[in-house]
Amino acid sequence: MAERTAREARAMRPLFLHGASARERLDIAQQIHVHSPCAHGAFVVAGLTGVPRALREERLFGTAGNGWLEQAQGGTLLIDELDCLSPQMQHRFALFLAGRTHVRREERVRIIVASCHDHATLLRHGGLEDGLRHWLASLPVEQCLGPERLQAVGSLAAASKGGLAAMFEPVMRSYVRAGLEAGSCNLHNSVVGAVEKPLIMMVLQHTGGNQLKAAALLGLNRNTLRKRIQELQITIPRLPGAR
């Protein structure tokens, strides 16, 4: 139960998307929402550039339940072009972000902010208010998705619809045919192991050998992951300087 709660908390962390086109950022944000714990809630887009400047604060924060933040409760809110927020709105939004830890579960909002500018450019030249600037600067690198990672998320979504299977099929067909002709009786373990081993190795490399984090990313129980590491004879990578 505690592991599931921790996994959900990680999946609800705010994200910063940058680069690509506005359309691509929107598509990726929708895909992230659909595969998150808040998929049952609304996906709301804060269309700042489509609203006159004088009305943006009211549309974002709202009154009587009609603001974008209120509409997105239990779901996801995408704020594209973060630098379109006025200094006053930035200050208010930073206060909202700081107070999110005390919000009831059903009132939580998954925040995704985006910009055509990268993280460093926004911090240097975006004219961000101190609170919002500090929030953006403190986001861990894994919560900042640039063009390459946005493309990877898009590829992952395509794979869930059969794209990855289609890529593997030609090679797998030859492999399976050779196994059948050789009279192999362990094809399932052989094929699954060939795919599983590099997958686990890449995730462990990403987490610096942290098996608890790797298990969460893989969607496995920690004991199951440890067993597979032993069975597949995987060498656990260590971060430089780790003991």
Image (spheres, rainbow, N blue to C red):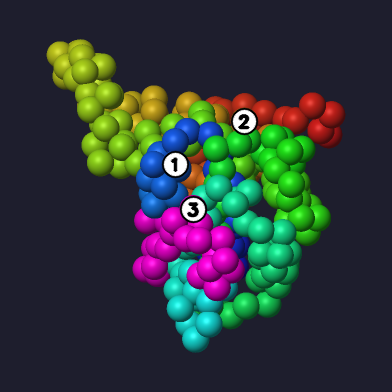
Q: Residue at x 15, y 14 (%)?
A: 181
Q: Position of residue 185 (x, y in %)?
A: 23, 27
**Circle 1 is placed at which residue position?**
22
Q: Amino acid at mark 3?
A: Thr
Q: Residue at x 45, y 73 (%)?
A: 71
Q: CA distance from mark 3 to mark 1?
A: 12 Å
Q: CA distance from mark 2 to mark 3?
A: 40 Å
Q: In what quadrant of the picture does the C terminus appear?
A: top right
**Circle 2 is placed at which residue position?**
205
Would you say residue 15 is visible in this rendering? Answer: no
Disc 3 is placed on an element classified as: helix
First along the sequence among labels 3 and 1: 1
Q: Position of residue 238 (x, y in %)?
A: 72, 30
Q: Position of residue 241 (x, y in %)?
A: 84, 29
Q: In what quadrant of the picture does the N terminus appear?
A: bottom right
First along the sequence among labels 2 and 3: 3
Q: Amino acid at mark 2?
A: Gln
The picture quadrant where one finds residue 168 is top left
Mark 2 or 3: the one toward you = 3
Instruction: Name the foreground residue: 188 vs 138.
Output: 138
Which residue range is magenta in the image?
Answer: 33-60
Q: Residue at x 27, y 24 (%)?
A: 167
